[in-house]
Image (tube, rainbow, N blue to C red):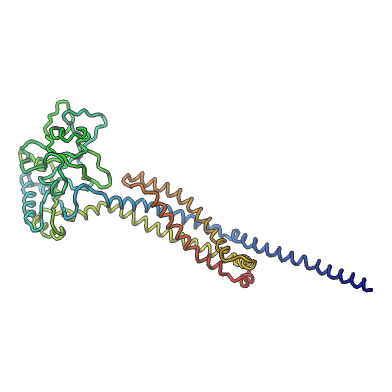
């Protein structure tokens, strides 16, 4: 009897164990389904479309920030260029008496009267003028024939400008050899010129003393008369533009030799004045207008400004493009950050139950944060790849359209990329923190 009782007890316990085993397996299967089913639900529920938008926003922000980097670096380079003369304490303005139909002697008298009156004003060191203003992108060029020089078919065309005596000393440009113009260089005297180092290098092999004995003439002919004597050599300066490095030979001629010896000429005689002061040149602006009005009240004053303000105007296009690209790049970066935050918040909301189960079975906050940040890495990597390709094309087109844009060092591009990654990490921090703080009991009740 005792043996039969033991056998019945063993059969009963074995039957109960067999009945429990499917339930345990069923719970395990349900747990796996919950983990895999929840993660798969995100993909099917349309999150891919939002992710695609985020990737596009990241790529666009990279391209715009790359363009802003190019413009910013070019602007920085422009602002640090040494033009070859001193721009501080310098006031400039333009006038043109020839537009009033005056003959050459009257035009010269107007300019000399203005110069004489201004130079005697308190705080004024010197006053000079030139036909073409500095850094105006206005160029006057002509082919020349230099005595003893044999050119070729690809000969350079030198630029030239007409200046008054004392121009280089007023602009604080050193005369390397010879001398600058004097009051004796007139329409009836020997024609003379001052050339720059680029001219000497090209036509005289860099021999300054040989250049001072040289002669040349404008035009090209076998019977040409060499009627212009070189009397001085100066360093090569940025006379027409800041953006392009000077390389074309430059010739400076006496302004008085633009006038006709007969007193009648059909050419225009504009003049850009430069006033070197000891104090703030802006304080002289009212005096300049009063002096010109006294000389001829019909004579308009053009672009009365300091030389620094004039140079700032030369930066305007680059400054504008820099500001626009920075604003657009910043906006695109902000939208990308907001979009990434939205996608991650959506993902965390969809996977709340899965995350709760992971926490329940032992996942810590770092594991959960990594789960969220893994998706961030995928989106940012995709955006970076597309953005770098787009930026490469955009920067190439910009440089092709504007030769004045400077190459950007690699570290600056890397800094731009670091800013983007930082913004993306900040945008993903809140969803990742929320995911790591999910209460597993509440998550398991979430459908």
- Is residue 250 shown above or below 386? above
Judged from this view, the residue extending furthest toward the front is: 2
| Image location of residue 219, percent across then percent down | 17, 32
Of residues 213 and 283, the one nearer the viewer is: 213
Horizontal and vertical percent position of residue 183: 6, 43
The C terminus sits in image quarter? bottom right
Q: Nearer the viewer, residue 174 or 37?
A: 174
The image shows residue 227, relative to residue 97, as above or below, that is above
Q: Nearer the viewer, residue 32 or 369?
A: 369
Q: Position of residue 387 (x, y in %)?
A: 46, 51
Kindly identify the residue that appears in the image at 6 percent across and 55 percent down. 120
Q: Residue at x 47, y 52 (%)?
A: 384
- Displayed quadrant of residue 45: bottom right
Q: Quadrant of the N terminus?
A: bottom right
Q: Residue furthest top?
A: 222
Residue 344 is left or right of residue 121, and the answer is right
**Residue 261 sits in quarter:** top left
């Amino acid at each position: 009897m005792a043996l039969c009782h033991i056998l019945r007890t063993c059969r009963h316990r074995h039957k109960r164990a067999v009945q429990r085993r499917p339930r345990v397996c069923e719970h395990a299967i349900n747990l796996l389904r919950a983990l895999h089913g929840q993660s798969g639900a995100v993909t099917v529920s349309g999150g891919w479309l939002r992710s695609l938008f985020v990737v596009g926003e990241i790529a666009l922000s990279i391209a715009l920030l790359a363009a802003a980097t190019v413009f910013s670096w070019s602007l920085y380079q422009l602002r640090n260029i040494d033009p070859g003369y001193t721009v501080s304490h310098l006031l400039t303005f333009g006038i043109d008496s020839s537009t009033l139909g005056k003959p050459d002697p009257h035009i010269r008298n107007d300019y000399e009267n203005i110069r004489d009156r201004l130079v005697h004003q308190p705080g004024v060191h010197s006053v000079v003028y030139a036909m073409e203003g500095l850094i105006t992108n206005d160029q006057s060029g002509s082919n020349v024939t230099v005595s003893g020089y044999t050119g070729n078919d690809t000969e350079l065309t030198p630029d030239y400008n007409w200046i008054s005596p004392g121009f280089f000393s007023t602009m604080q440009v050193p005369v390397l050899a010879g001398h600058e113009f004097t009051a004796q260089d007139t329409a009836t005297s020997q024609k003379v010129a001052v050339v720059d180092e680029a001219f000497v290098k090209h036509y005289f092999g860099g021999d300054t003393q040989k250049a001072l004995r040289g002669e040349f003439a404008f035009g090209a002919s076998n019977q040409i008369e060499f009627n212009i004597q070189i009397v001085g050599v100066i360093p090569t300066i940025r006379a027409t533009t800041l953006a392009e490095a000077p390389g074309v030979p430059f010739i400076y001629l006496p302004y008085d030799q633009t006038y006709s010896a007969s007193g009648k000429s059909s050419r225009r005689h504009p003049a850009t004045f430069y006033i070197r002061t000891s104090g703030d040149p802006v304080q002289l602006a009212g005096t300049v207008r009063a002096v010109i009005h006294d000389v001829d009240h019909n004579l308009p004053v053009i672009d009365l400004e300091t030389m620094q303000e004039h140079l700032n105007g030369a930066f305007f296009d680059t400054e504008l493009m820099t500001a626009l690209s920075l604003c657009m790049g910043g906006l695109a970066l902000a939208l990308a950050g907001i979009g990434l935050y939205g996608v991650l918040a959506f993902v965390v909301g969809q996977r709340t139950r899965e995350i709760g189960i992971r926490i329940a079975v032992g996942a810590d906050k770092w594991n959960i944060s990594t789960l969220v940040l893994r998706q961030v890495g995928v989106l940012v990597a995709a955006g970076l790849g597309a953005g770098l390709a787009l930026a490469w094309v955009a920067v190439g087109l910009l440089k092709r359209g504007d030769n004045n844009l400077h190459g950007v060092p690699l570290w600056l591009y890397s800094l731009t990329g670091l800013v983007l990654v930082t913004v993306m990490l900040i945008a993903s921090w809140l969803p990742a923190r929320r995911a790591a703080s999910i209460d597993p009991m509440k998550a398991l009740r979430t459908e």
